[in-house]
Amino acid sequence: MLSRQLFWTIANATAAALVDGSTGPLFPTAEGEDYNEWANGQYCFADDTNYAMADYTNYPTENDFYNFNFVIPAGATIDGIVIYANIETNDTEPARSKMTIELSWNGGTTYTSTGNYIINTVRNAFQLLSAGSSSNTWGRTWSASELSNANFRMRGTFVDGGTNPYESLCDYITAIVYYKA
């Protein structure tokens, strides 16, 4: 398994070869404005030992994240958006820990519906997973203004594929926007 530092170095080098620019991986700094069903959602703001928790006694559980503080040149063409999440499940059937990921361009009024999701495939171990790519625009054309703190939202929804309640944890979430200036 790659170390996190090596992973980010490879991800950024690969992205640099494919596009003119990227924001680099940025953490959200706010959460729970419209969807606030994860305990301690603010723990997704940093790569540390604090974790947000989705409890399946009330599944599916949704939470929104925003204020990623992207710096994108006005008039840039958005090539793709990647969301990374470091998640874990304590379920005996780990592949059931699925998080759908949707993006909003208008402050959470409307979200993409392109079917992007991540699935944790191991039990009691964090996995750094991604949705999107440097060339995936999530089914729409984005403008730089739609990626402002006022407009951009990421909604994560943990869903349970079975009938037994369990917990899913999220250590952190980051977003990278790839663009041509």
Image (cartoon, grey):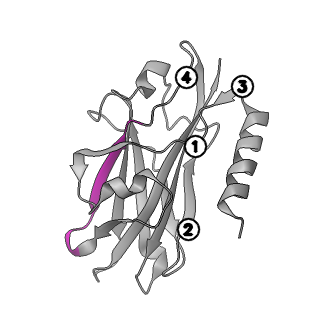
- Going by the numbered disc 4, the residue's amino acid type is Ile
Residue 91 in which image quadrant: bottom left
- Going by the numbered disc 2, the residue's amino acid type is Gln
**Is 21 positioned to the left or the right of 96 in the image?**
right
**Which residues are drawn in magenta?**
57-67
> Which SS class for mark 4?
loop
Residue at horizontal 32 percent and vertical 79 percent from the top: 166
Residue 51 drawn above or below residue 153? below
Horizontal and vertical percent for residue 46?
46, 53
The residue that label 3 is drawn on is 20
The residue that label 2 is drawn on is 127
In the picture, the quarter occupied by the N terminus is bottom right
Residue 127 in which image quadrant: bottom right
Does 62 appear in magenta?
yes
Horizontal and vertical percent for residue 34?
22, 43
- Going by the numbered disc 3, the residue's amino acid type is Asp
> Which SS class for mark 3?
loop
Does 131 appear in magenta?
no
| Mark 2 crowdedness (10 Å alpha carbons): few <14, some 14-19, many ≥20 | some
Horizontal and vertical percent for residue 15?
72, 39
Horizontal and vertical percent for residue 4?
65, 60
- Going by the numbered disc 1, the residue's amino acid type is Pro
> Which SS class for mark 1?
loop
Q: 43 or 79: nearer the eye?
A: 43
Q: Which mark is residue 72?
A: 4
